[in-house]
Amino acid sequence: MNLDGFSKHLLICNGKTCTKNGAEEVTETIRGELKDLELQREIHTTKTLCNGQCKHGPIAVLYPQGIWYKNMNRIKSEELIQLLKERRSVYIGSELYYHDGITFKNYEEGK
């Protein structure tokens, strides 16, 4: 896969627990929104296996920002893609971790 030209990469967990909790709907929603908003050449998606945050799943991880989103669902997925299109803040109230430029930090502890 050549990622030249892409500005963002969304990793969508489709491990066993996330799938049980709706990861396939999250994946389909994100990919559908990217297509509908003509963002497939800007934002690449990858279905992953377990990302190690099963109790918070479904998980989506946005790069290069390094933001981990927990408890994703259809509505949060639509909101995230809309915010990415508008190039606005990507805060959707579901953040688990963020990257401060050096390390990952727990979002709740970083407030």
Image: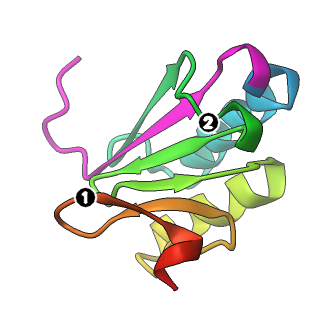
Q: Where 28 falls versus 7 (above or below)? A: above
| Left or right for 24, reference 95 | right
- Mark 2 to mark 1 CA distance (whole Å): 17 Å
Give the number of callouts.
2
Which disc is residue 68 wearing? none
Q: Which residue is mark 1?
A: 103
**Farthest residue in the front direction?**
109
Residue 98 drawn at (x, y percent): 41, 63
Q: Earlier in the sequence, mark 2 or mark 1?
A: 2
Residue 71 in the magenta stretch? The answer is: no
Amino acid at pointer 2: Gln
Residue 46 drawn at (x, y percent): 45, 26
Q: Quadrant of the N terminus?
A: top left
Q: For the magenta stretch, what is the residue range?
A: 1-17
Which disc is residue 53 wearing? 2
**Farthest residue in the left direction?**
4
Q: Residues within 10 Å of mark 2 (few under 14, many from 20)?
A: some
Which colouring convention does the figure follow? rainbow
Residue 54 drawn at (x, y percent): 70, 31
The quadrant in which residue 13 appears is: top right
Residue 8 in the magenta stretch? The answer is: yes
Q: Residue drawn 80% across and 48% down? A: 73
**Farthest residue in the bottom direction?**
111
Q: Residue drawn 62% across and 36% down? A: 53
